[in-house]
Image (cartoon, rainbow, N blue to C red):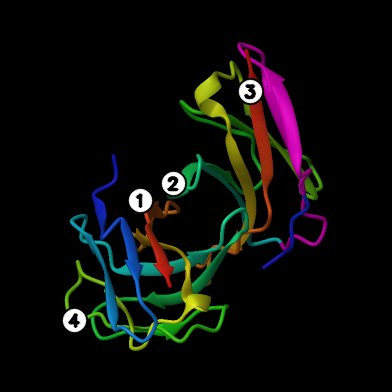
């Protein structure tokens, strides 16, 4: 069982609100990732981090931002939510020399 | 990273072996083949990976052709809980660890 957590699991919020999706892992992994997945579609990488104070944009352009102040924590923020941000957001982590990415349960975001 | 091609869907009878194919004809010498699965919109789960030798673990077996242009994931005794979307991903060991997910194969295990 992977020790990677995401909160909230479900969020319904109005347009224009600022939101932060939390992701934390207790495995001491250096590498962390955020993916976005629309229903029935493939996952797209939107952000990743090699370690503390390291963040990079992924393959899919996203209006969200991330931070990595602590190894175990990789929150994602939307400054002003819009209906186009409605999606599932999945966080993952990986140890430096491991082939396996561990995924969290995801946050299902709905912006009305 | 090399592109992969998988059939969009497959059915398998419960208790039988499920053989999921993947084509990766443009794979490079240092690229690994990874398999993940995603059960009903949960986070994806790692299954197995390999470079050129066949691999087996408690979940599945991975058979890679000698020219490495295709591979097959084998679930030896499929159960209803194996119903999921299965992703074949090719990734270099030297990149950031990014996984590029395609559409995958939806495996339906039927009683």
Residue at coordinates 49% horizontally, 28% vertically from top-left? B59
Q: B44 left or right of B10?
A: left
Name the spot of residue B2 as percent of width and height, x first. Answer: 72, 64
Distance from disc 4 to disc 3, alpha carbons, whole Å, reads: 44 Å
Chain bearing mark 1: A
Q: Quick check: is B21 in the magenta stretch? A: yes
In terms of secondary structure, where does tag 2 sit?
loop
In which quadrant will I find the C terminus of chain B?
Answer: top right
Distance from disc 4 to disc 1, alpha carbons, whole Å, reads: 22 Å
Give the number of the mark in front: 4 or 2: 2
Distance from disc 1 to disc 2, alpha carbons, whole Å, reads: 6 Å
Residue at coordinates 61% horizontally, 59% vertically from top-left? A42
Give the number of the mark in front: 4 or 3: 3
Q: Quick check: is B62 in the magenta stretch? A: no
Name the spot of residue B29 as percent of width and height, x first. Answer: 70, 61
Name the spot of residue B75 as percent of width and height, x first. Answer: 60, 25
Residues marked 4 and 3, same chain: no
Distance from disc 4 to disc 2, alpha carbons, whole Å, reads: 27 Å
Mark found first going from the N terminus, 3 or 2: 2
In terms of secondary structure, where does tag 1 sit?
loop
On residue A105, which mark appears? 1
Residue position marked by numbered label 3 in the rendering: B109
Distance from disc 3 to disc 1, alpha carbons, whole Å, reads: 23 Å
In this rendering, the answer to whether A58 lies above or below B59 is below
In this rendering, the answer to whether B66 lies above or below A18 is above
Distance from disc 3 to disc 2, alpha carbons, whole Å, reads: 18 Å
Q: What stretch is highlighted in magenta?
A: B6-28
On residue B42, which mark appears? 2
Residue position marked by numbered label 4 in the rendering: A69
Q: Residues within 10 Å of mark 3 (few under 14, many from 20)?
A: many
In terms of secondary structure, where does tag 3 sit?
strand
């Amino acid at each position: 069982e992977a020790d990677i957590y995401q909160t909230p699991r479900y969020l319904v919020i109005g347009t224009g609100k600022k939101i932060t999706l939390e992701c934390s892992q207790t495995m001491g992994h250096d590498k962390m990732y955020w993916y976005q997945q629309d229903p029935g579609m493939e996952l797209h990488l939107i952000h990743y981090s090699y370690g503390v104070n390291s963040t990079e944009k992924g393959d899919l352009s996203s209006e969200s931002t991330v931070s990595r102040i602590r190894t175990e924590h990789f929150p994602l923020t939307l400054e002003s939510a819009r209906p186009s941000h409605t999606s599932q957001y999945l966080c993952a982590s990986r140890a430096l020399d491991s082939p396996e990415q561990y995924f969290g349960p995801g946050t299902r975001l709905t912006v009305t | 990273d090399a592109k992969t091609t998988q059939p969009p869907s497959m059915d398998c009878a419960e208790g039988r072996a499920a053989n999921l194919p993947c084509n990766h004809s443009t794979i490079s010498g240092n690229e690994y083949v990874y398999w993940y699965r995603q059960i009903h919109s949960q986070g994806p789960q790692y299954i197995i990976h390999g470079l050129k030798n066949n691999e087996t673990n408690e979940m599945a077996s991975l058979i890679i052709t000698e020219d490495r242009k295709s591979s097959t994931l084998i679930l030896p005794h499929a159960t209803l809980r194996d119903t999921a979307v299965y992703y074949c991903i090719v990734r270099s060991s030297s990149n950031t660890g990014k996984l590029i997910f395609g559409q995958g194969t939806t495996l339906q295990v039927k009683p």
